[in-house]
Image (tube, rainbow, N blue to C red):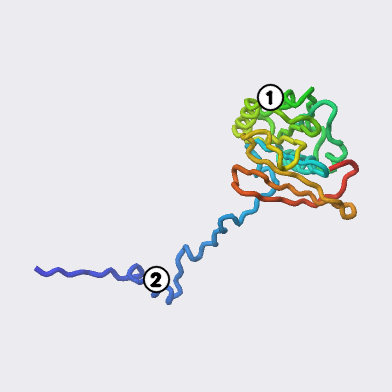
């Protein structure tokens, strides 16, 4: 008994070289090239910090408010309310916030007697699920918060896709608020050139990215302090 082998005819029988000669290209060759790993550069935007416990630290000519205001304004533009919690006796300069595009009438400001009370107030705000950004302003006070409270803040931020941003006054070499801080950035303001300031946020630790990065913003000097 003889066996006859039939070879399939048509395009399927052509090898890649023959197809290329006929001008046929594969779908993979026509697809846009994928960006190389690590080519994406993080930016200080709400998408980068949502669902995270974040610490903005600095000393001297720092730019805590510049970067915190940017998140608040972006959240408001998206229709997601933001809130600001601070310790009694300290606050931001309202004209600066308005100049940065913040709707002051839509920004609740909570004054607490000390840092732990401020963090507990922030916890209640985040737990409500009604805020996209909650800033805890601890500049000028000792930023020591109980680990259990930080754990709750981190968990609530992730659950409600909210950014919980703590502002602290300390050098880069000082430890962060705790191991549950997902992103810690050092924020600095360079000397002004005319009326312009160069503000830089440098990631000292980023659990999501796993590597350092920096974002630079050029801002005009406001009537108050950055």
Which of discs 1 and 2 lies nearer the camera? The answer is 1
Vertical comparison of 30 with 147: above or below: below
Provide the residue designation for mark 1. Answer: 124
Q: Which residue shows up at 83% across the image and 32% down it?
A: 91
Disc 1 residue crowd, few under 14, some 14–19, many 20+, Cα 10 Å: few
Res 113 label? none
Disc 2 residue crowd, few under 14, some 14–19, many 20+, Cα 10 Å: few
Q: Which residue shows up at 70% across the image and 24% down it?
A: 120
- Residue 211: x %, y % from top left: 61, 49
- Residue 197: x %, y % from top left: 84, 51
In which quadrant will I find the N terminus?
bottom left
Residue 170, quarter of the rendered image: top right
Provide the residue designation for mark 2. Answer: 16
Vertical comparison of 40 with 48: above or below: below
SS assignment at label 2: helix
Q: Is the Cβ of the residue at disc 1 closer than 8 Å to that at disc 2?
A: no
- Residue 107: x %, y % from top left: 78, 32
Residue that protrudes farthest toward the bottom in the picture:
21
SS assignment at label 1: helix
The one nearer the camera, 22 or 186, is: 186
Residue that protrudes farthest toward the left in the picture:
1
């Amino acid at each position: 008994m003889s066996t006859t082998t039939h070879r399939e005819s048509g395009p399927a029988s052509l090898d890649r070289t023959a197809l290329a000669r006929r001008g046929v290209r594969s779908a993979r060759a026509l697809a846009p090239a994928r960006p190389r790993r690590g080519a994406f550069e993080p930016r200080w935007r709400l998408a980068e910090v949502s669902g995270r416990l974040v610490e903005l630290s600095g000393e001297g000519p720092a730019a805590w408010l510049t970067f915190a205001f940017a998140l608040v304004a972006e959240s408001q533009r998206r229709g997601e309310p933001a809130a600001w919690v601070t310790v009694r006796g300290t606050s931001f300069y309202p004209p600066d916030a308005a100049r940065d595009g913040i709707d002051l009438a839509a920004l609740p400001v909570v004054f607490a007697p000390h840092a732990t009370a401020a963090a507990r107030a922030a916890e209640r705000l985040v737990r409500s699920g009604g805020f996209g950004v909650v800033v805890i302003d601890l500049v000028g006070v000792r930023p020591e918060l109980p680990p259990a409270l930080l754990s709750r803040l981190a968990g609530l931020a992730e659950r409600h896709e909210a950014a919980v941003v703590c502002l602290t006054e300390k050098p880069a070499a000082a430890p962060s608020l705790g191991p549950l801080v997902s992103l810690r950035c050092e924020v600095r303001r360079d000397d002004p050139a005319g009326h312009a300031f160069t503000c830089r946020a440098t990631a000292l630790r980023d659990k999501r990215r796993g590597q350092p990065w920096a974002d630079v913003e050029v801002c005009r000097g406001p009537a108050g302090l950055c």
